[in-house]
Image: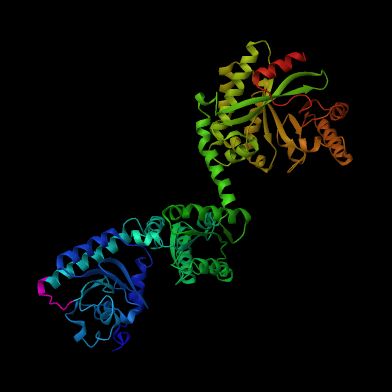
Amino acid sequence: MPDPALSRPNDELQRLAALHALHLLDTGSSEDLDNITRLCHSLFGVNGAYVSLIDADRQWVKSQSGPDMCAPSRELSFCDHTVSQRALMVVEDATLDARFADNPLVSGPPHIRFYVGAPLLTPEGHAIGALCITDTVPRTFDAAQRKQLQQLAALAMSQMLLRRAIGRVDPLTAMPNKYQLREDLASLVPADSALQEAEPGTRALAYIDMPDAHTSFEIGSVLGSRIHDELIRNVGARLQTLVQGQADVYHISDGRFALLSHAGKAEQLAGHLRGMTAALEQPVDSMAVPMNLPSYGGIVSVVQTREQLRDAPRKAVAALHEALARRQRWADYDADADVMHQRRFRLLNDIPDALLPERQQGGGLALVYQPKLDLRSNRYHGGEALLRWQHHELGPISPAEFIPLVERTALIRPVSEWVIQAALQQMATWKDEGMPVKLAINLAAPNFEESDLIGRLERGCRDSGIDPAMVEIECTEGVWMHSPAVLKLLHEIRALGMGLALDDFGTGYSNFAYLQQVPASVVKIDQSLIRHLDSSARDRRIVQSLIALAKELDYHIVAEGVETAQTLELLRAWGVDEAQGYYMARPLTPEAFSAHVRAAA
């Protein structure tokens, strides 16, 4: 039998590129193509009808209506001949055709005697496969039937092009996008009930940021969008080259790409990706500007079931976030870490609901109040408002868990606004009960970038009838305070008459030089320094030094985290103005706070 490779067109590489650009190989069946093969089966009254794609060394049957006719190699495929001649091919009796008489598909199952194939031609004229019909008996095929099959082949080709073009291709890189990935994952679930009973295969899905979002933003800002876009295109092309034959590459967003392993290549792909370090570290050219791009990726292996395939992108993203957090090139999906990420997402998603008034009696946010003891009079003149959350399903959520999450999102504004209003309303209630109390309210660094914060504070005090002098705004010290806009706002808070307290003082960024710019009236010595005063001579020296310097600069000094009588007396002797901590009282409900303060009066 003549070697079909000898008659293949010279543009074989371009033909294969056109085939691969459709991203149809190694994916499941398409309902649109299945409709066409079913129609052919019925219209021509044959044994079988098929959509067949011809790759470099094999045949892919993308849709079939009839018995399996996929050839074990490209050379044995009838459709390879159709592709080579790029024209309709009719074989009325394969046993009488020298090209096919010895073909195992003729002498054995499926016993092909009759074959007609119409080439699937791209707009550029590349034959990527064929729409073919077969039968187990010799047949003739007239001119009208030939025309019908060619028209149906053109329709099949249009469906494949349409699948690629509408919402499935990224306009920047011309690579399949996240919607195509979702469709391809869904297509990996066997549609045939018999296949569903077999052991499902495994796929590996990797998400990679190259470059990461921060670097991508900097490149676009400094070098412009043209260089940025060319860089992304070149990254996509490099990834396609690096995983060729092992995975399909998808452009998810900006600098994020997804890699989906081919059948049987899941374990191989995971190992291959970890071996790509040197290749990924090579500079990527963009308009003659070579750049070293950081890359971070997450990998997940999933069994080809509907549930696991549907959840694969989310798990790959979770693994990617772990890689970003650890600043390592690759991270495997970790179920425990994923549970934590899902919990964080759940908490953030439930915060707006927790702010609703109807949730305040159960499942909502609430304020508790920790008294501050005046160490000179030994009475309570004020306290600190502290945020708590009793989730309606998850129970009590620690502030250490949910507040840092909120501070990194736009939710910090409505949450802080709720805290301000709730604290002022409680102060108004105590005032009406004859117990005016000075209260400290915590705000986060992002709040001090809100241009209308001063107006909201002023309006809140006016509406509740609270003198601004009775309010103290607490914030954690840090480099963010150096912003001219923030410094201006801090001065405006003081101009309202409110106090300004630096929380957690003595840790992290602390230095007294920048206090010359920040108009703070109070420093709160961090509880980590206070807690071990009884047993640590080093902590005692540090705290005494902080107190001495703060007194020299005329700050009101508050110590938090007081847990023993000995600690309280040390702080009193060193000249601390106020103290709070479990030794005096834990954070209390409004009613318990009122009773505690009145009892000490």
Asked which quadrant contains residue 488, the reply is: top right
Q: Is residue 58 above or below residue 321?
A: below
| Image quadrant where one finds the N terminus | bottom left
Where residue 243 sits: x, y (%)? 48, 70
Where residue 226 sits: x, y (%)? 45, 61
Pick whichever, 297 or 89, lies toward us: 89
Seen at 58% across and 42% down, the residue is 408
Asked which quadrant contains residue 7, the reply is: bottom left
Is residue 309 in view? yes
140 within the magenta span:
yes
Colour scheme of the picture: rainbow
571 within the magenta span:
no
Give the dominant element type of the magenta stretch: helix, strand or loop. loop
**Is 316 positioned to the left or the right of 570 in the image?**
left
Pick whichever, 310 or 599, lies toward us: 310
Where residue 468 sits: x, y (%)? 64, 21
Pick whichever, 222 or 545, lies toward us: 545
**Is 575 positioned to the left or the right of 126 in the image?**
right
Q: Is residue 439 above or below residue 435?
A: below
Bounds of the magenta span? 137-144
> How many discs mark residues in the rendered view?
0
Q: Is residue 278 above or below residue 212?
A: below
Where residue 574 sits: x, y (%)? 87, 29
| Image quadrant where one finds the C terminus | top right
Seen at 36% across and 76% down, the residue is 58
